[in-house]
Image (cartoon, helix red, strand yellow):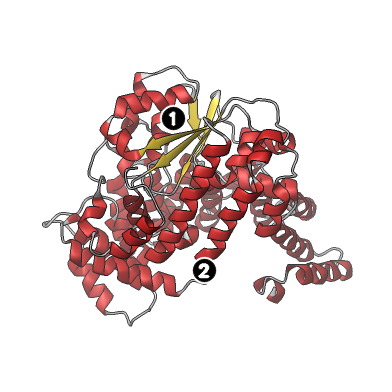
Amino acid sequence: MQLFRQRRVDEAVSACLAFSKSNPESNDALLLLGKARQMQGRFEDMLELVETALKREPRNTGLQLQFAGACQFCGHHDRALAELAIVEQTARNNPGLLQNVGQLYVNAGKFKEAHRCFLRAIELDDDNPQFLNNLASSFIHMGDMQQAEDAYSSVIRLAPNHYEAWYNRSTLRKQTASKNHIRKLEKELKKLAPNEAGETELCYALAKEYEDLGKDTRSFYFLKRGADSYRRKMEYDVQLDVALMKRIAELFDRDYAENAKSAPERRGPIFVLGLPRSGTTLVDRILSSHSQVESLGEITDLAQTLNRVSQSADRQELLETSISIDPDRLGQNYLRSVASYGANTPYFIDKTPTNFLYIGLIAKALPGASIVHLKRHPVDSCLAMYRTLFRAGYPFSYDLDDLAEYYIAYDALMKHWQTIFPGLVLDVSYEGLVDNQEPVSRTIIDHCGLDWEPACLNFHRNKAPVATASAVQVREPMYRDALARWRRFEPQLAPLIERLKEAGIDFQA
C-alpha cells in the first residue's frame, strides 16, 4: 500500500506477487494484485483476479462490488449492471451498501437506478448527511431542483461543515434579493482560517449568489479567492497539457490522415465535444430529443478502450504508441464496450468534452461517426470554466494564466484537426445556436445523417437525466443570459484577454 501511494507501480506488483505466492488462498493478495494491474492499465488481468476471488466467496458483497467496478473498467457494462442488480436486492435493508451500489450505477450513467438506491437508503437512515447529499445530487440528475435544494438544506442543518452542499445549493436557481444565502455563507466563511477546508466551496457559492444579484465586483472577489484557494492545493503544470496537445498534432499529421489504415465505416456514434461549459450539454439534449438518438452522457469508454488496447496507463507512452494501434481493433472494442450499456436506438451520443484530443483516432477507428464541436467566445469560454467548481476534473480552470495557455493550445489543436480532416468536424458556435436556434439545430441534425424532428427544438422537455454542470440550465428553454457575460468582468479578465489576443485567438467566434 505504501508503494501504491508513492505510485511505484512496478515495485508494488513485485510485492503483490510475493505476497500472493506466500499466501495462495488469500483474497487480499488477489485484490492487491488486481489494484496493481489496474494502475498498469491491465484491466482484463484485474477483472480475472477479482473473478477468482469471487469464486471463493460468491456471497461477499464487497467482492461483488469490486467485480462490478472491474467490469466497468473493462467495458463489460452489461455484466457490471447484472451484478449490481443482484447486490441491490441483497442491500435492500443496508443503507451503506445501497450507497455503494448507487455510486456504481452513477459511474455507469444509470441515474434512475442510482436514484432508486439513494431514495431507499434515506428511507432506512434519513439523518445521514452523506446519504442526503448523494440523494440531492440524484435529484439534480433527475431534474427535480426543489427537492435537491431541500435535501442540501437538510445536509447543511445536520452537518454545517459539509461545504460541498453549501456550494451545490447555491447553483440550483437564480438567487434574488429577497431569497438568497449570502448572509449565512459569509457568516460561515468568517469562522474559517485562511486556506482552511471549506474556503473554496463557500467562496464559489458567494461568487454565484453575488453575481445573481448583479454585484459583479463582489462576485469576482470571492470567485478569485475560491479559485486561488483550490489552485494552491494542486500540483499541476499547464505546460504539460500544452506539450501534450502539441505532440498530438505532430504525431497525427497530414501523412497520418492520408495514409494510415482506416477501419470499415460504422455509423451510429455521435461525438459531441469541446471545452467544458461551451454548450456541449445543450447540443446533447437537442440531439437526444430525436427519436433515433440516445445519449450515454460523459462516458470514458474511448479513453479506457485505448488504454486496454495499448495495455498502457502511462500518458506519454500511450500517446507515442497510439498512432500504431490497429484502428479496426480500437473501433470494434469501443463499440463493443458502448453496446454493453444497452442503448435502444440506432444512434448514440458520447458527450465527453475532452474527446477533442482523440479526433485523429476517431477518424480512423470509427469512419462514419459524426463529430460536433462546440465553440464559444474565447473569453466567455474561459470565464465559464473559471466560475465552475469542477474539482480535479479540469485542473487548468482555477487560474486565469493556466486557462489562457490551455485555451490557446486547444484552439491550435482544433484548427489542426480541421486542416487534416476537412469536413469531418462540424464547428457549432454556441452564440450562433442561441441566436438562431432552429437553423443551427437543423444543421446539427443534418450533419449527423438524421431527418429533422420538431422535438429537437423542445430539448428542455427531454426527461432523460443530466449529470453535468449544466443540469439546471438545460431544463429551461433557450435563453441569452450567458451571452457576453465576460463584459461584466472585463477589467478583472484583462490579463487573460491580453494573452489570448497576443496569441492571435479569434474573438469573433
Look at the picture and state if 173 lies above or below 284: below
Q: From the top left corner, tell me how far across and down residue 170 is, in percent.
A: 27, 57
Q: Quadrant of residue 445?
A: top left
Depth check, mark 1 against mark 2: the one in front is: 2
Tell me: 307 left or right of 22: left
Q: Disc 2 marks which amino acid?
A: Tyr
Q: Compare residues 154 and 50 and report the one nearer the observer.
A: 50
Q: From the top left corner, tell me how far across and down residue 213 is, in percent.
A: 16, 57
Q: Compare residues 93 and 235 and report the one nearer the observer.
A: 235
Q: CA distance from mark 1 to mark 2?
A: 36 Å
| Quadrant of the image containing the C terminus | top left
Label number found at residue 236: 2
Looking at marks 1 and 2 on the same chain, the residue that comes earlier in the sequence is marked by 2
Q: From the top left corner, tell me how far across and down residue 493 is, in percent.
A: 29, 62
Q: Disc 1 marks which amino acid?
A: Ser
Q: Answer few, some or many: residues within 10 Å of disc 2's Cα (few below 14, many 20 plus, some between 14 and 19).
A: few
Tell me: 231 left or right of 80: left
Q: Residue at x 29, y 65 (%)?
A: 223
Q: Quadrant of residue 218?
A: bottom left
Q: Identify the residue position indicated by label 1 in the image.
A: 288
